[in-house]
Amino acid sequence: MELGSLRIDGLRLFDTLELAIEPGWNLFVGANGAGKTTILEAAYLLSHGQSFRAGTRDALVQQGRDGYTIHSELDSGRVRRKLAIGRFRGRLEARVGGETTTVGELMRHAAVLCFEPGSHALLSGAANERRRFMDWGVFHVEQSFLATWIRYQRALRQRNALLRSRSSDAELTAWSAELTRWGEPLSLMRSRYFDGLAQRAAPLLQQLLPQLGAPRLHFRVGHDPNRSLGEELSAVQGRDQERGHTTRGPHRADWSLEFEFAPKREHLSRGQEKLAAFALLMAQAGLYQESQGEMPILCLDDLTSEIDREHMDRAMGMTADSGAQVLATATEWSPAYEQLPGALARFHVEQGRVRRLL
């Protein structure tokens, strides 16, 4: 999968920007705050419908504008599609081939993964970060995932509303059954995907962090695995009524990573957390390629941050070996880029303006 072109209007610093993206590596160099990350962010929005950066959605819109748009041409196999996403007056809109569609449908046509300075939160952050990471992958390999996830979320909201309003046991039992109906297949899809992710990630983790010993990944479905979700919801219904929310289910799912010589996350340095997150990202990219027949686009935002030269070379080599199209940012040129195979398109970014150098 490759971006052929990218047009940005009204996104952060950019009034209007049109870029021709090369198939291999594309490096955007410039000072902090120049707008480099926004280019990666634009590609990511096509694939996720939201930014990888923290902050409100309104912060994406350039000051003085009432919205932003991102247009692209994306090659997938032998098909070239025009994709677009925009936000106007708080409403997100998506298009595929010029036709209005849902953001979910847009996401099926665009696959972009991003490694950025906050990627260590995949290990050290809240569980919702890890669920979001996993669910993006499940979405692309399980056709029924999105519909199942939406129905589960609706049932969860309804059950929580009943818990807060002190509704009858009969009403709660009915919505517990609905939650189970969609929650059990949701957990099954996640478990199936996670098994493949763990298998792919293990050798990559050992390649990047050999000093930590054998890695082990564990998935927790969000309730006692020794009984069904329905049984669990029935067992904790009294507690849920006291607390006013559903305490068991796939919305509480999580996963963790430990190493033979670093069994707790606290044993890892920030740099080691980032390298582990990078390995997991590449494992997810590999799973996508296995199911879809092509690599997703990879965005690397400031790869050198808190990673030494030796490990940066390993990570860049792993990326180059994948054959993926890459959009990368850096504050300055590094000799490490000279070791990359093939041509590298180099751009200079300064205060919302982009100039191609090579």
Image: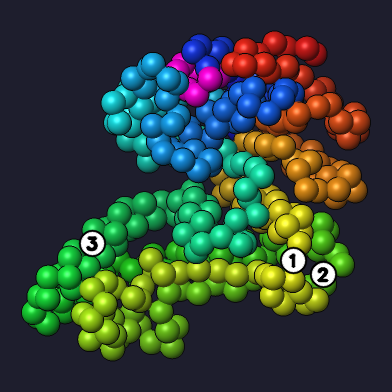
Q: Nearer the viewer, residue 220 or 147?
A: 220
**x and y, in percent, of residue 56 in the image:** 41, 39
Residue kind at label 3, given as amino acid type: Arg
Q: Nearer the viewer, residue 231 or 310?
A: 310
Mark carried by residue 212: 2
For this view, does 54 lie left or right of residue 152?
right
SS of the residue under disc 3:
helix
| Residue occupying image coordinates x 80% and y 76% | 261
Q: Nearer the viewer's eye, disc 1 or disc 3?
A: 1
* N-term-proximal mark, 1 vs 2: 2
Is disc 1 surrounded by few (<14), some (14 to 19) or many (20+) residues within 10 Å? some
**x and y, in percent, of residue 21 in the image:** 65, 19
* N-term-proximal mark, 3 vs 2: 3
Mark carried by residue 157: 3
- Count up the numbered dots: 3
| Residue occupying image coordinates x 42% and y 25% | 61
Examine the rendered structure and indicate whether residue 150 appears above or below residue 187: above
**Which contiguous range is marked in magenta?**
6-13
For this view, does 105 lie left or right of residue 264?
left
Is disc 3 surrounded by few (<14), some (14 to 19) or many (20+) residues within 10 Å? some
Examine the rendered structure and indicate whether residue 87 appears above or below residue 300: above
Residue kind at label 1, given as amino acid type: Leu
Q: Which residue is mark 1?
A: 268
Say if the magenta span includes residue 231. Answer: no
Magenta span main SS: strand
| Residue occupying image coordinates x 23% and y 81% | 242
- Mark pair 1, 3: CA separation: 37 Å
- The answer to whether marks 1 and 2 mark residues whose Cβ atoms lie closer than 8 Å is yes
Examine the rendered structure and indicate whether residue 2 appears above or below residue 170: above
Quadrant of residue 1 within the rendered picture: top right
